[in-house]
């Protein structure tokens, strides 16, 4: 499995990023000495610097020499490692939030035009002994059918097959602002992150689950100082 990992390194110079990164990841090397207790969700067998999904820099910091780039192009507004203060995390959050807001509003328009739909979980509970019936009745709802039609054409910007399979009724349930805040947090979250004190944290840490992992990483990112160097790596296990 390949996965993205964010490593918090502290205030190190660009020349020392790679040694610091190597040291921070070394305790989790599956090929090295196995730590006890062994956590299968906190190991890698190889890692590398990504050429995609890099960290966007603030426009005014595009040429900042403190940023480490894999291709050495100082004109590019992306890096694999840089001090937090010059990384444009807000742009990531804002873009994700704007897209999610438009999707929420599009679904709200569908709901207004049709009878209020019920989530798939409702039908699964009602037809607990007849799962096939739940799968027939849930998609028969007019609002769900409209999303399905758009998903089939693959032309709608928000109504996709991934939204349909996730159940739009459940996805867009609850408070709009709470939903958008969660999406914004996910925009800066990665499968794993390594803290300044050397902890490897994922959704499996203390069985906290993905939503809690996203919230905790978002909070941790906001808590570190602006001179803390943050690195993006790809791991495999």
Image (cartoon, rainbow, N blue to C red):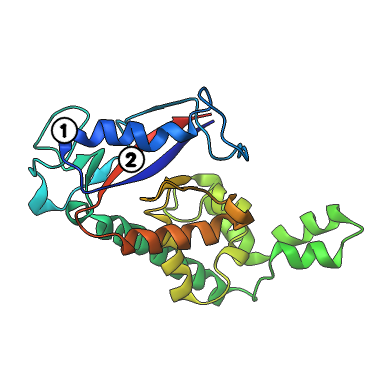
The reply to whether residue 65 is visible in this rendering is: yes
Foreground of the two, 50 or 176: 50
On screen, 44 above or below 175? above
Q: Secondary structure at mark 1?
A: helix
Q: Which residue is mark 2?
A: 232
Query: Where residue 72 appears, x then y in whole percent?
Result: 14, 28
Query: Where residue 114 appears, x then y in whole percent?
Result: 60, 73
The crowd level at tag 2 (other Cα within 10 Å; few <14, some 14-19, many 20+) is: many
Query: Where residue 112 appears, x then y in whole percent?
Result: 54, 77
Which of the labelled discs sits on residue 15, or is there none?
1
Callout in the foreground (1, 2):
1
Q: Secondary structure at mark 2?
A: strand
Foreground of the two, 236 or 186: 236
The crowd level at tag 1 (other Cα within 10 Å; few <14, some 14-19, many 20+) is: few
**Residue drawn at point x = 65 percent, y = 76 percent:** 115
Residue 172 shown left or right of residue 47 in the figure: right
Residue 75 shown left or right of residue 136 in the figure: left
């Amino acid at each position: 499995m390949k996965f993205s990992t964010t490593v918090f390194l502290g205030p190190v110079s660009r020349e020392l990023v790679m040694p610091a990164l190597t040291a921070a990841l070394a305790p989790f090397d599956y090929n090295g000495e196995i730590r006890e207790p062994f956590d299968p969700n906190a190991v890698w067998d190889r890692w590398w610097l990504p050429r995609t999904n890099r960290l966007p820099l603030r426009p005014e910091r595009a040429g900042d020499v403190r940023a480490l780039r894999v291709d050495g192009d100082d004109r590019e507004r992306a890096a694999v490692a840089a001090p937090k203060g010059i990384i444009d995390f807000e742009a990531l959050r804002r873009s994700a939030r704007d897209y999610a807001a438009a999707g929420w509003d599009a679904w709200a328009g569908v709901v207004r035009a049709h009878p209020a739909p019920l989530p798939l979980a409702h039908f699964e509970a009602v037809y607990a002994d007849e799962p096939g019936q739940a799968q027939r009745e849930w998609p028969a709802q007019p609002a769900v059918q409209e999303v399905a039609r758009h998903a089939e054409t693959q032309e709608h910007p928000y109504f996709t097959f991934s939204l349909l399979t996730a159940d739009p009724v459940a996805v867009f349930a609850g408070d709009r602002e709470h939903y958008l805040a969660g999406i914004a947090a996910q925009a800066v979250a990665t499968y794993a992150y390594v803290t300044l004190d050397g902890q490897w944290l994922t959704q499996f840490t203390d069985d906290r689950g993905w939503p809690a992992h996203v919230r905790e990483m978002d909070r941790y990112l906001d808590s570190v100082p602006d001179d803390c160097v943050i690195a993006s790596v790809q791991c495999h296990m």
